[in-house]
Image (cartoon, coloured by chain):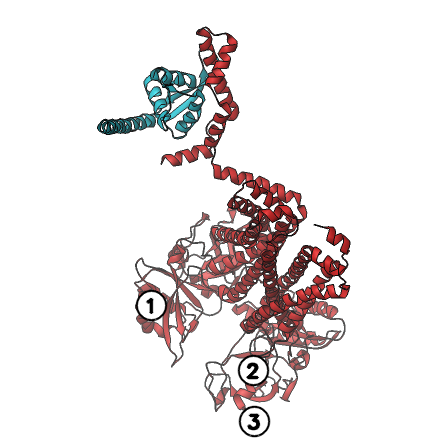
Amino acid sequence: MTWLRVLFSRLAGRGRTPAELAEEMAAHRASLAAEYERRGMTAEAAHAEARRQFAGATQVRELYYEQRRIPLLDNLARDIVYALRQLRASPGFAFAAVLTLALGLGANLAIYRVLDAVLFRELPVRDPGGLVQIQLLEGSDPQRVSYPLFRELAARQQVLDSLFAVSDVGLPAPDGGRGFMVSGAYFRTLGIPAQIGRVFTEDDDRPGAQPVAVLSDSYWTREYARSTSAIGRTLQLNGARAAIIGVAPAGFFGETPGAARDFWVPMSLQPAITPGDRINGAAYSWLSMIGRLRPGVAARQAEAALDPLFREFAHLTVTRFGRDYRVRVAPANRGIGDLDRRFERPLWLLMGMAGLVLVMLCSNLANLLLGRAAVRTHEIGVRLALGAGRWRILRQLLTESLVLCAAGIALAFPLGSRGASALAALASVGTGLRLEAGWHEAIFALAAALACTCMFGLAPAFAATRVDVHSALQSQHRTTAGARRRHFANALVIAQISLSLVLICGAALFARSLWNLRHQDFGMSRDALLVDIPLELTPQAIAHQGALVWPLYERMNLLPGVRSAAVSAFGPMSSLLRTVGISTPERAAQRTDVTRLVCVSPGFFETMGIPMAAGRGITAEDRAGAAPVVVLNQGAARALFGAGSAIGRFVSQKDRYAARDAMQVIGVARDVRFSSAREPFGFVLYVPIAQSPAPVTGIVLRPAGNPAQAAAAARAAVKSVDPNLKIGAIRNYAEAFEGGLGNDKLLAAIAGTFGLLALALCYIGVYGVLSYAVERRTHEIGIRIALGAGRAGIYRMVLGEVSLLMAASLLVGGAGAVAATRALRGMLFGFAAADYTLPLLAAVLLGSAAFAASYLPARRASRLDPVDALRQD
Amino acid sequence: MDNRSEVPYGTLDLMVLKTLDTLGTLHGYGIARRIEQVAEGALELNQGTIYPALLRLEQKGWITSHWGASDNNRRARFYTITRAGRKQLAAEAENWSRTVAMMARMLEGES
């Protein structure tokens, strides 16, 4: 271990400074001289003798110096200083290189950080690796379970240390916070202690226990200003007053990434705060289960042990006869929810695009460096001639790249942080995501930076040092290494243009897909105003908003500036969705049916602008007590009644047809985009709200004049009917629809940015390589002109070179673009199967850009003065 | 003919250690003088070369040093052998004696 100590003491700079050494040696010489004097020499002779004895002081100092240092580090430091000096000599190049690297690396870091937070980060809880989700699969679809089933499983299972259930139904607090019900073992299983107060346990989750709540750190900060006096205050939750007993630690957002919780209450409170008794009722499937495996128990074993338990108690949850059920134990180290599934594809895609951009940037830089190497041929030739090793010069050139990259990555980190936040906001990935740098990211950044350095630094450095000393010294411009270097530069440009083509094609596809989404046939007019009325799922709220249906309907229809108005429950763009089964005498409900029930007042279809394909809409005649009627959408009518007319036929809102609750079809409405851009239309049942009473969740208005005035009037009118009723957004359908395009907008925006960047880089790349080629061939072009070549001929020559480059790149890039188009098809909207128009257009665009870039160098070549050109050597 | 020989490679460290072991704390000049005295003129020592040796030994942790005042009242650096240095000295000395004995046997046998 002695070498370690030596290394350490050298790193620590132990030992004397040169000044101290000089002092020490001077003292030595003085002693020596004094000794000689004592022996009888003159003072002068004594000093001379002492110096002789102490020969080679400089050599000693050198030796000493070598020993104090670590030569490799020393050389590195010298290389870095030299590299900085070189870069300072060409600030334009340094600035451009660092900036492009910072942008490229920053984009990669930003996307990686979001990717890491969404796909890789484990829950911030104790030993997340031990957490598993216990799912009940119907076929392959996970189902929610009822509380009674959970209770039996939790009490009887032998394979889990503990098991808890969570609901994702939010409980609104008066101040706007949203709490969630979790069973008593929640905090114990996750290993989350309270930062102040205490967390609740199974004891707080017994029937009759004192109602309690635990706050999240962010909610505590937001609503209670981190005051410890929050403990002991109460939260009013519908029928219950829960005492705040503690605050969860900072950074703990719950078990569902992207959906941060404000507070948690024990599940036993449920009957007091939401409708129905779900604690004892088996008819509600509303829970997800998470547990911690006992040490040594594998997921498979747990499944095998839980399966018979489930079969024994299956009657305690909603199961459908004849379906096939089984238990799955899946890892829950990253929590539950669908955040990762929703964002996995777009994020990987963006990561891939950012990677391509980085590769392009690097090849661009490599080209710039090649240009610099050409300029420095003479310098490098001199250094080689003076005896510098090729490896030594190579190392020096690579150090220069490394310095550029280090500066780039230093700038990339803050850019990446901002970018990640912007990206998360743009994609609305949800709340509570921890977008912070972790060691994952540090490794990623380091790897990316090193890869970049190698990509753009290595090849130019090799090319620069592959110099024939003799010719390098003779000429500043022409070297034998030139041809090889030019081939390399051409290869780089081909790579750049090909990658650009893929990126631009991707950008065009996503932009077009977004356009298609926005301009599709919605089946209805999109300028009706939608007034969203949020509904809390409490018995009181449901009854209250049920009673408001007719007062609101009448008041709205009297508004000046409103041509017509209607109210609805579970209507378009409502966050609430009610699904039912639908059957006819001939056809029972099928598993694949998705049937939406919408309760509407008279005038709904006219106001929404939904045309009737057949029959009539719902009118005031369809009142309570009259014959029950229904309007189907085209999809439902076609599926239930085939080509035959649906009008006059009967359907039942049950899985199996029953004549006693049959409704007669009076109309067929056109298929409309109900709430989401790309979902299949599915089945929609419109029933008169008079016959199927429901709480009002939305008002639709067709304004006669200015929509903003109509919106203001509507808001005032709602307040005049019930001053306490909450009003959500008032917007037209087109605006409401935009909200659902998050992923598409994200992809279009980022792909578009990358595409533009690629186009710019491509332009710069072509310009750079041609300029270099023209400069290199100045002599030759001069001769050609002198021998009578016309300007047009020179143009043709340069452009011919570009055409060759373009042909090669479009061939390679075109294949890539077609492959990308195929791979992306699943994420695009509104493209025919073999629609390659956009790749073609991208190629044309890129081709024009390349020829535009070649104009200046070509002109320069054609205007060369042959006399100057020939003199230049 | 000059029968003074140069310091054999690798032995200077051992000489310095032995000197410090025998005489205790010394400055560079003292060490050089002592080595010359012991060699009784049989050794050509460039006195400067002991400084890199001293640094080397110190970096290895075999000696320590501190500033003090020399006989003629100049600031000088004083060196002391450490426990690790003594251990190293013992090992090296043993090694050296074995080499010398071996060399002696070999040369006797040749002549």
Instruction: Please give the chain letter of the residue carrying mark 1.
Output: A
| Front: mark 3 or 2 | 3
**Residue A73: image location, x then y, percent:** 49, 39
Q: Which mark is residue A303?
A: 1
Q: CA distance from mark 3 to mark 2?
A: 18 Å
| The chain in cyan | B
Q: Is residue B75 at all visible to an observer of this figure?
A: no
Amino acid beneath label 3: Gly
> In this orientation, does residue A349 appear?
yes
N-term mark: 3 or 2: 3
In-front residue for pair B11/A345: B11
Residue A216 sits above or below residue A705 on the image? above
Instruction: Tell which of A807 and A472 is nearer to you.
Output: A472
Q: Nearer the viewer, mark 1 or mark 2?
A: 1
- The red-coloured chain is labelled A
For the residue carrying disc 1, how many other residues have a C-alpha within 10 Å: few (<14), some (14-19), or many (20+)? Answer: some
Residues A800 and A163: in front is A800
Q: Of marks 1 and 2, which one's residue comes earlier in the chain? A: 1
> Could you tell me which quadrant the N terminus of chain A lies in?
top left
Residue type at mark 2: give it: Leu
- In this picture, is A226 found above or below A745? above
Helix, strand or loop at mark 1: helix
Mark 2 residue crowding within 10 angstroms, few (<14) / some (14–19) / many (20+): many
| Residue ID for mark 2 | A685
Callout 2 secondary element: strand
Q: Which residue is mark 3?
A: A644
